[in-house]
Structures are given as C-alpha cells and as structure tokens.
Amino acid sequence: MNNEYLSLAIQKLLEGLTLNEAKHLLNQAQQDYEIGLNRSQVKQTKPYCENAYRKPKPSKIQQDADVEAFILNQHYMTQTEMLKLLKAKFGVYRAPSKSGLNRYLKGLRGAK
C-alpha cells in the first residue's frame, strides 16, 4: 500500500465525524500504534464514536418476536423437531432455516 491510498482510506473513514471526533480518533490510533498493541487487542477496544463500525443486521428470528418467543419457550428438543414445530405453527416463510436456527441457538449459548 502506498501513502496516497492510505490517506484516501483514512479520509473515507473519517467522513461524517465532527472535527473533534476525528482528532480524538486519530490521536487514539497514534497512541495505540506507539504502544504497540497487537490486532486482537485493538479489536476488543470499544470504538469512540458510534458510526466507526457497522452493527450487524438482526437475524430473521430476532426480527419476528412471536417466533423468538416460541423458540425460547421450548425445552429439551432437537433442532430438527423444533424446525418441524416452527414450520407447522408459523409456516415455511416465517420459520427460520436450519442454519439460521443453529446460529441463533449458538448465540444464546454465547459460543462463537
């Protein structure tokens, strides 16, 4: 990467920030660089401004409160059985996919 590319990338990232937010963000980045933090430590720090990172889109289950409540009220059931119940109760369109259900349940357990 050359300096011109980096300058354009930084400029693009700072768009939409006030002058004080941009200065603070650049000062923080310089301090982090000087301290020599590795990438994993930088990712764990919370960004200064809200629009620094895009928030993930809620899953299909999280967007449908009835489906989410139904899933949370089920106990001791395999995912296949739960999917059959979801399709019977809410229809194929509102029921999540097998992988979507798996990701949602994995997120409830706190696994990555």
Image (spheres, rainbow, N blue to C red):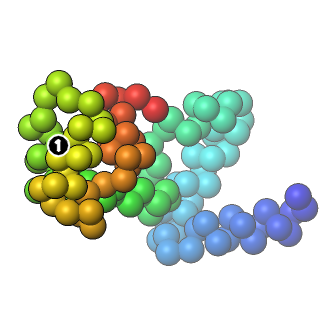
Is there any visible trace of residue 33 in the rendered image?
A: yes
User: Residue visible at 36% across and 53% down?
Assistant: 97
Question: Looking at the picture, does residue 44 appear above or below residue 49?
Answer: above
User: Residue visible at 29% across and 36% down?
Assistant: 79
User: Residue visible at 50% across and 35% down?
Assistant: 44
Measured as percent of width and height from the top left, residue 5 is found at 83, 67
Q: What residue type is labelled 1?
A: Ile
Question: Looking at the picture, does residue 60 appear above or below residue 68?
Answer: below
**Pick the front one: 92 or 32:** 92
Could you tell whether 44 is left or right of 3 in the image?
A: left
Callout 1: helix, strand or loop? helix
**Pick the front one: 92 or 22:** 92
User: Residue visible at 85% across and 69% down?
Assistant: 4
Measured as percent of width and height from the top left, residue 76 is found at 17, 24
Question: Looking at the picture, does residue 23 appear above or below residue 74?
Answer: below
**Pick the front one: 32 or 111:** 111
Could you tell whether 94 is left or right of 59 in the image?
A: left
Measured as percent of width and height from the top left, residue 92 is found at 26, 63
Indicate the quadrant containing the N terminus: top left, top right, bottom left or bottom right.
bottom right
Question: Looking at the picture, does residue 89 appear above or below residue 16?
Answer: above
Measured as percent of width and height from the top left, residue 94 is found at 23, 63
Classify 10 Å Cα crowding around label 1: few (below 14), some (14-19), many (20 and above).
Answer: some
Q: Name the residue under label 1.
A: 71
| Residue lying farthest to the top in this orientation | 76
| Residue lying farthest to the bottom in this orientation | 16
